[in-house]
Amino acid sequence: MFNRLFVTVSLGLVIMANTNTPGAATEDLLRHVGFGGVCADCDLSGKDLSDVAMQGASFPRANFTGTNLTKARISGANFGKAVFKRADLTEALLEGSNFARCDMTGAKLDGIEAQGINLSYAVLNGVQGADAELIGSNLSHSSMVGAKMQDAVFDNSNLSYADLSRADLKDSSLQNTRLFKAVLDGAKLVDADFEGANLKQSEFGRADVRGANFEEAMLVGADLSHVKGLRQEQLDGACGDAETALPENLTLPICDEAEWVNAQTRNGLSVFNYSFSFDMSDEDRAALDKATREAVRESGYAMQKARIALAEALTDGNYPKVIIERDGQTYSWPNFDDVRSEEQRALARAQRALDGLELNNRRAQRALDVAVRSLAKAQAALRSSHEEQELAGRE
């Protein structure tokens, strides 16, 4: 048994407008929208949600295709597996939120300010993100093919295994960023800043690295053999090993012999940890803890409650019944749609709250996945039990 913090199942919508303006247009009203609670699989595509405030909300698998989210303020929210294709998040403020496995193909991210967000396995192909800031964030395994993110900031973020093929990162800052086994083939890295970055086993392909800064960058096992514009002075402050592939006539200091590498190791600076969090009052924390315990208890006893409800329905003569007349005979049995409603809703609430979350801790993620699968099995068992009882009522 384990506890997982999540918000109660509800969706709050608050609209504020200038009441002194009769007949204000709907699109104007929606400029001051606040969302909270849980709304899995919601369809909010094409909506005008500019200036929206979302705090502690959960929208797993929601559809925001083409939605206007300019200057949105989002913190502590869950958008696991949501779709933001061609959405406009220009100058949005994103803090401590989960966007794992989101599809943001073609989205506008110009000028966003993001700290501690999770975009692991997200699809960001073709996004426009000039001057975007994604600081201390997790973009591991993300796909950013053809992304246009000039002057962007990725400092202290994790882009391990990310695919940045043909991405335009001109003048971008990737200081102390982890790019282990990242793919940079064809990327525009002109004047990019990789100071202190971990580029071990990264594939640069035919990237353009003119003027890029590799000061104290680790290039162990990296392949730069076909890059464009690389000069010796760019490599003098970096380090690699015998497996590092370089253009002809260029050399690289060995990491084992570099004093700055040893200093980082002694100070523990070579270890990268990434997480996201948000502030919460003691009152809110107590409420979330209570909601978590109630949901776990509900799902744990759901099957027992279902059996009791079924037994009561079979003996309660006043309970709603389904009646069919056939061959001159009248057949009746309880309306199991009514019997199961409370129990099914309890299971559905717990499943929606947990499903779509993406955790950095593998052990916790496995436990969460098992819980979601168990809830799905419980729902299936309830449906099967209801169907058997319905068949029994017909015989």
Image: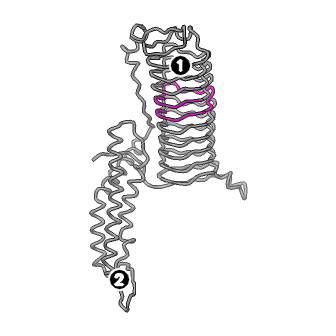
Which numbered circle lies on residue 194? Answer: 1
Q: As shown in the figure, which amino acid type bears the numbered disc 1? A: Phe
Residue 145 appears at what percent x and percent y? 57, 34
The structure residue drawn at horizontal position 54% and vertical position 13%, both measured from the top left corner, is 247
In the picture provided, is 121 more to the left or to the right than 24? left
Q: Nearer the viewer, residue 26 or 357?
A: 357
Q: What element carries label 1?
A: loop
Q: How far apart are marks 2 and 1 (CA)?
A: 74 Å
The chief SS type of the magenta part is loop
Q: Is mark 2 on a helix, strand or loop?
A: strand
The structure residue drawn at horizontal position 49% and vertical position 19%, both measured from the top left corner, is 223
Residue 62 appears at what percent x and percent y? 52, 50
In the picture provided, is 177 more to the left or to the right than 48? left
- Report how many numbered discs are placed on residues in the image: 2
Residue 179 appears at what percent x and percent y? 48, 25
Mark 1 Cα shell of 10 Å, populated few (<14), some (14-19), many (≥20): many
Residue 391 against residue 189 in the figure, above or below: below
Q: Which stretch did the figure color magenta? A: 138-165
Residue at far bottom of view = 328
Q: The C terminus appears in which quarter of the rendering? A: bottom left
Residue 96 appears at what percent x and percent y? 48, 37
Q: As shown in the figure, which amino acid type bears the numbered disc 2? A: Ser
Q: Which of marks 2 and 1 is nearer the N terminus?
A: 1
The structure residue drawn at horizontal position 49% and vertical position 49%, both measured from the top left corner, is 61
* CB contact under 8 Å: marks 2 and 1: no
Q: Does the magenta stretch include residue 255?
A: no
- Residue 290 visible to the viewer: no
Q: Does the magenta stretch include residue 152?
A: yes
The structure residue drawn at horizontal position 40% and vertical position 19%, both measured from the top left corner, is 270
Q: Mark 2 points at which residue?
A: 332
